[in-house]
Structure formats: C-alpha cells, structure tokens
Image (spheres, rainbow, N blue to C red):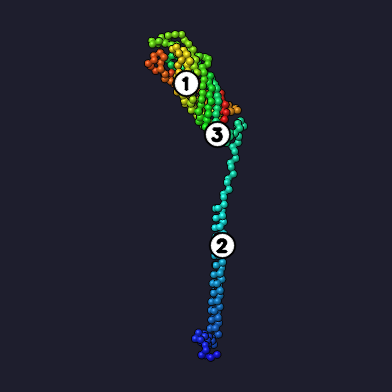
Amino acid sequence: MTLLTLTPLTLLTLLTLTLLTLSLLTLTPLTLSLLALTIAAFALALLTLLTLTLLTLTLLTRSLLALAALSLSAQALAQAPLPLPPPPPPPPARRDQAPAAPDGVDFGSDVSAGYLLGSLIGPWPGKGLHGAVFGRYDAFLVARDHSGWRLGLSLFGGRSLAPLQNAVDRDETGAAAGPAQAIRFTQFGAMTVLRPDPELPLGPFFGVGFSRLDISEGYYGGPVVLPLATFELGARQRLPKNLYLDWTLRPQWATARSGQLPNQLEEWWLFEGGLQLGWHLR
C-alpha cells in the first residue's frame, strides 16, 4: 500500500499517531508517569460518572413504577363499594312494654276515667258543689316509649253525679220565681293536650279546647246549652304496669243568652277538679 492510495483522514490519523509517538519518546520518565496518572484519574472519573448515572436511572425507574402502582391501587379503592356500617343495636325493652307496633305505625293512646268535684257559677245556679263522672281517650303523635313530651288530641265526656247543685228561676227583679231544683247535665268535647314523658315519676300536663254543656231541663222551663272554652292543667303521677294518676284542675268559661232577660248575655263559669286513673294503651 502506497501513500497515494490512503485517504486524507487515514493520513491525518497516521500523522497524529507518529507525532504522539515522537512526543512520548522525547518525554522524560517523570512526565510519562504524570501523564499515566492523569489518564487513569480521567478514566476513573468517567467510570464513576457512568455508575452514578446508571444508579440514578435505576432509582428513577423504580420510583415511577411505585407511583404507578399506588395510582392504580387508589383508583381500584375509589371504584370499589364502601362497606356499610353495622346497624345500631335495638334499645333495651322495658319490662312492662307492650309488643312493638308494626312497621310504619308510630302513635300512642291513653284511656282514663275519674271523678270531678266542681261548681257551676252564673246568674241561675245557686251556691254549692256538684260531682261528675268523667272519661276520656287521648291519641298522640308518638308511642308511649318515646322520651320527652307527647302532643295529642283528647276526646272526653262526663255526666253529673251526686252531689247535685241546685238552681232557682228568678224574675226581672231577681226574686225567686219557683222552687229550687237540681242541675243535671252532660258534657263532651275535644282539646289539644300536652303530656309529659310516661317514664317520669311526676310531671305537669296542659290542655286547651272546647266543650258543650247540656243542661237537660229546669232552666226557666226548658234546656240550655253552653259552649265552653275549656282549659286543663295538672300533674301526672306514674304508677306500675303502665298506669298513671292525673291530678286535674279544669276552669271553663261560656257566654250565653239569658233565660231571664232574653235581650242580655250571661257569663257562666265552671270550675272542676279531681282524680283520673288512666292506662297507656300504646
């Protein structure tokens, strides 16, 4: 092979190697040693850089794989249905509690009966007291096992009983126009009531409503009907086996046309108080 057949690049390479060889031959042993150490240090630095680069790439790859796995796990958990919490345990049943009501039924009811002693006050009745037997049915929005106040509707009725109060017809001057006669009446009505928690040993109660008092005969030769505004208050005492005792006070008021003077109105008052024994049905 001759110099004419070599390419310029090959000639440049041969020239560089020749110059390097001549330079090495002219260097002292100390210079050669320093050059060898420099080349070794450069090779070691290059190897270290390559190692760190590979380690960094490895750690980065593992981190990306871990993040991808966490993202997939979070998506799977988000799509999975959450478990429902266990239902709360039922409240302990009372020893005297009746069987539970069917589903969708939540109301309460009480029944009671008692005896009231009172007085009818007005232009016609005389002074004195009367008795009355009394019964009622109360319906509530919640059952008796509800804790707290109970709001409901009360239907009640009663009839006069001994002792009987007397009355006398009078003329326009106020003098007696006939003999004294006993007042016999029936009463019935409805009211809104507020009753305490059935579990309270003693608690107050209230009621307001309307009633009708029918005096069947004797009022100036005929009957009379009084529309009464009825108010009720008292205290309820708890008894065993869902029984209770009501200490009741009931003031009532009415305005009606006078039988003595038909062009005038009369004010009537009815005050009664007594005891009622009742039972929580629900």
Q: Which residue is mark 3?
A: 106
Instruction: From the viewer's side, name the closer residue of 188 and 117.
Output: 188
**Mark 1 vs 3, N-terminal side:** 3
Whole-number angstrom distance, CA of label 2 to CA of label 1: 88 Å
Q: Which residue is mark 1?
A: 212
Whole-number angstrom distance, CA of label 2 to CA of label 3: 59 Å
Bin the neighbour count of mark 3 within 10 Å (Cα to Cα): few under 14, some 14-19, many 20 and up.
some
Bin the neighbour count of mark 1 within 10 Å (Cα to Cα): few under 14, some 14-19, many 20 and up.
some
SS state under label 2: helix
Pointer 2 with pointer 3, Cβ within 8 A:
no
Q: Is residue 277 above or below residue 67?
A: above
Residue 79 shows in the view: yes
Q: Residue at x 57, y 59 (%)?
A: 69
Q: Residue furthest front?
A: 222
Tell me residue 67's x, y (percent). Answer: 55, 60
Q: Residue at x 45, y 16 (%)?
A: 224
Give the label on residue 179, or none. none
Pointer 1 with pointer 3, Cβ within 8 A:
no
Which is in the foreground here, disc 2 or disc 1? 1
Q: Residue at x 47, y 25 (%)?
A: 209
Q: Is residue 8 above or below residue 84?
A: below
Which is in the foreground here, disc 2 or disc 3? 3
Q: Which residue is mark 2?
A: 65
